[in-house]
Amino acid sequence: MLEHTRKRSLNGNDEKIMVESGKIFHEENADILKEEAEFVLSEDPKIEQRILRKCDKHILPWLFGIWLCAFIDRSNIGNARIDGLTTDLHLDGDKFNVALVVFYVPYILIDVPSNLVIKHFKAGYYLPSLIICWGLVSTFMGLTKSYTGLLVCRCLLGLFEGGLLPGIIVYLAMWYPRHEMSWRIGLFYCAAPLSGAFGGLLATGLSRIVVDSYKRWPWIFFIEGLITVIYGIVTLFFMPHNPGHAKFLSAEEKIVTMSVLKEDSRGATMEANVDAEKFSWHWVRMALLSPNLWFTSIAWFFVLVPLYSFSLFLPTIIKSLGFTATNAQLLTVPPNFAAFLLVLLTTYYSDRLKVRGPIMVAGCTLAIIGYAMLLGVKHHAATKYGGTFFVACGVYICSPMVMAWLANNTAPHYVRATALGMEVAIANCAAFVATFSYLTKDA
């Protein structure tokens, strides 16, 4: 029976049909799947590493670009602020802070529903569609002439970006076993600090454009939003939904991938193929009753307070040290780039050493040192600027850790999808604190 199955699934004309339809991945063939994978591994012991390299090559670059665009488009309002946004739209008092916080209301509310439908709409279609939608919103934000228009755009931006981060983590969990996750999360999440560096450079050039009544800050939204839309359209044609749909994997590699992921989930579901698992409210209850969910969510909440306030207000902080708007934009690059490098380093060793919490403690300690430098030093701009390096490096390395921590400890698909959606929703309530951390009246 095994030899017959192997012949049909790995050789002959039925190979593509058998693998892509998922027939050999269903519950009734679970034992056959395991035996097939063991046979392939005995014939080719290096196949697992080859699969990981292929997934890294064909999956991670797209996710990196997605997160880069997402963080640029949500944070570029901070760059626009010091290039005339608050003056042109008459954002006196706390109006700018309100414009920041309204982004997070739909962003939080959409997390769990979005994660529950990602499999139904197919991840390879769903995630790129979100990119295109928020890219269009970001582009049209440059056209706004009023405070009300800005609020509407920020709400829509939050609606379309809301399902992205938990969706990406669920998507990664469809491809990688647990102790390969932190490094992969780091490889895409390092785009967040890099976006601060890249966004600052872009804003420096774009803020010099003047065409008719659109002067300086609108062009930050026009060009960066348009880049996002184009990237989303390209991604739509290249992102596979899951390993069963991956054209870059051979039939043997698909079987090994499914078997490894099933074994890694420790029997949390009888279905080896994510397409075969069906939604049940039982999975939702399992996620909500998990102590892992609440512990990691609260931990991440306290990480995101400094992370969001830092990413949104760094240009303002640096300008307040006595620099011009242009120089302030440029000076956002070095601390963000330092954080980018440290995220790569810590996530790599997190997977190798199989630790998450101690790295988060180290990161929080760095951030405390940075804030002490910003708060305690009164008249030495260079020292205060040095503090921004400690803050950036400290807060950015924590998020990949806490995301991987929960993803590692929840299964199967719908439990993980619910838990990650709830984690992002709860943790992002930190935005209501972060966006009001730096008020104009306290400057």
Image: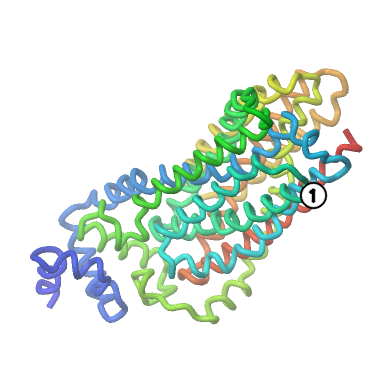
**Dot 1 alpha-carbon crowd within 10 angstroms: few under 14, some 14 to 19, many 20 or more:** some
Rendered position, 7 above or below 138: below
- Left or right: 395, with 229 as reference point: right
Q: Is residue 53 left or right of residue 413?
A: left
Q: Quadrant of the N terminus?
A: bottom left
Residue 344 at x, y percent in the picture? 50, 37
Q: Which residue is mark 1?
A: 98
- Is residue 331 depicted above or below 172 in this figure? above
Q: Amino acid at mark 1?
A: Val
Query: Which sits in the foreground, 238 or 178?
Result: 238
**x and y percentages locating residue 75 in the rendered image:** 65, 40
| Closer to the camera in the image, 93 or 256 | 93
Q: Residue at x 57, y 69 (%)?
A: 113
**Quadrant of the image occupied by residue 339:** top right
The image's colour scheme reads rainbow
363 left or right, relative to 316: left
Residue at the limit of the structure toward the right, as seen here: 441
Image position, residue 370 (x, y; %): 74, 32
Residue 362 seen anywhere in this rendered image of the structure: no
